[in-house]
Image (spheres, grey):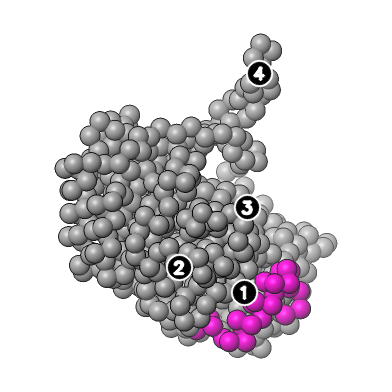
Amino acid sequence: MPPDENSAVAELETASPRQSSRDKVITMERLAHIVAASQRAERIVVLAHGVFDLVHLGHVRHLEEARRCGDELVVTVTADRFVNKGPGRPAFPEQLRAQMVAALESVDWVAISDYPSAVPVLDALRPNVYVKGSDYADAASDLTGGIVEERRAVESYGGRLVFTAEIAFSSSSLINRYFATEDSPLRSYLEARRAENVLDELIRRFEAVAEFRVVLVGDTIIDEYVYVEPMGKPPKEPIIATLERGREIFPGGVIAVANLLAGFCRHVEVVTAFGDSDDFDVEALVRTTSKPNVSLSVIRRTGRTTTRKTRFVDGGSTRKLFEVCVMDDGPITGEEDAAFADRIASRTEHCDVVIATDFGHGVITERVIDTLVRSSRFLAVNAQTNSTNQGFNLITRYPRADYVCINALEARLACADKHSDLRSIAGEILPRRIECSRLIVTQGKEGCMTFDAQNGVHYVPAFSNNIIDTVGAGDVFFGVTAPLVATGARLDLIGFVGNAAGAMKVGIVGHRRSVDKVALIKYLTAVLK
């Protein structure tokens, strides 16, 4: 449709009567036309943006005051997939949230925003006035820094930012108090942490690691996802035929952990190895996808390929069908081994935390472990058991660490104990196998056990979440928690943060994006209100 016809349609829509709240919920594209038409008619358009998960009196008064700032009030509601407010949130799906806001007399139009923040909405609509609640008036108290970006976006085209002064409530607080969807152990745990007012303590710990310099040591893994559509069984063979629909390739292993940590710490240096016989440029892929504050120190493994794991995935359900690995996981030897250990020793002196992500694919040898143990001021270790090394890559390879994070199976294998209570494994048996005063044993959807010499064993329940992909969830838990442990924070609180980060990661396919610091803080803030 030509621009003049769009304008005419928009102008008619601004004047047309609306019969119900549903009629006021429109697409972002239509809303942009309506806003532009109203502004051509010299009407002042006001925008309010938010989740509006549980519409309450605070919202009503906020939107009524917003309406008084102009001639028309439009509201954008955050889409479900961008709501980072904890398990079971949003409590109401986006269409219902949008219709509830549209039912208010003060609101003229509502659209669902398929963006993670308000900035793209402001760029698309360019309202005359953007209205926020009084709790955002002090930019210094906005933990996410979003209000600064929103003000910049509004003022870039001549709009203005206004803060309402009406009574404030919190949807998260009301939902947590009266509509809690968590199971009983998690609900009790959260109530206890709210009573302790631990959020301020967690924020201080995040601020403490912001200037950290981290050295990461471990295997680079290339994770490839091939999306297929099952077609059925061929008539002459006992197999399932599939039709390829697309593929994605992600740098995984130590590189994925580095990109995660880059959002929390000032600088991350990766000491790793690539093969020299790959069929594509692994280093180019890694460098182009690494965050700006990630640097690489790489040795080449002569005559070998970089470990590559290709997962064939049902594109409709994102369920993995099978995996094909290309690797040579024999240990590096001779000059390569010595060079790798020397690289580590030369980089640990001036860093705050050394993190070993040991996937058991050959780069962390006995010589490397000895170097890590001797040269690290603070050493955090994860020694992973996977399908290629089960029973051979145990945490007991490390005589000492300042922090160990492994899963329940890895802990049992390290203790050669299949049946003992996990509390005993975490708090008694495993600490006798490795010199380490701070341990976390993760259990996926069952939460985690934390142990430190002063406070003993604590159980931290998991956050329920819609599981899309579990790949990398344990790495995210370990990566987020390792620097926090180095600050001396309570280990049970660190386990709580790790569970939250893991719950966010299982909603992300592969390594499409990292768990973001701002999103994690929003998540923690929402569940602790």
Left or right: where does residue 298 sit relative to residue 426?
Answer: left
Residue 238 tag number: 4
Q: Position of residue 17 (x, y in %)?
A: 79, 62
Q: Is residue 451 magenta?
A: no
Task: Give the mark nearest the N terminus, 3 or 4.
Answer: 4
Q: Residues within 10 Å of mark 3 (few under 14, many from 20)?
A: some
Q: Position of residue 523 (x, y in %)?
A: 57, 69
What residue sits right under mark 1 in the picture?
527
The single residue placed furthest to the right in the displayed view is: 19
> Label 2 vs label 3: CA separation?
32 Å
Image quarter in which the N terminus is found: top right
What residue sits right under mark 2 in the picture?
431
Compared to residue 138, the image places residue 215 above or below, namely: above
Task: Magenta stretch: give its range.
Answer: 177-200
User: What's the residue type where badge 2 is placed?
Assistant: Pro
What residue sits right under mark 3 in the picture?
467
Q: Secondary structure at mark 2?
A: helix
- Residue appearing at x 40%, y 32% in the figure: 326
Task: Give the mark nearest the N terminus, 1 or 3.
Answer: 3
User: What's the residue type where badge 3 is placed?
Assistant: Ile
> Label 3 vs label 4: CA separation?
31 Å
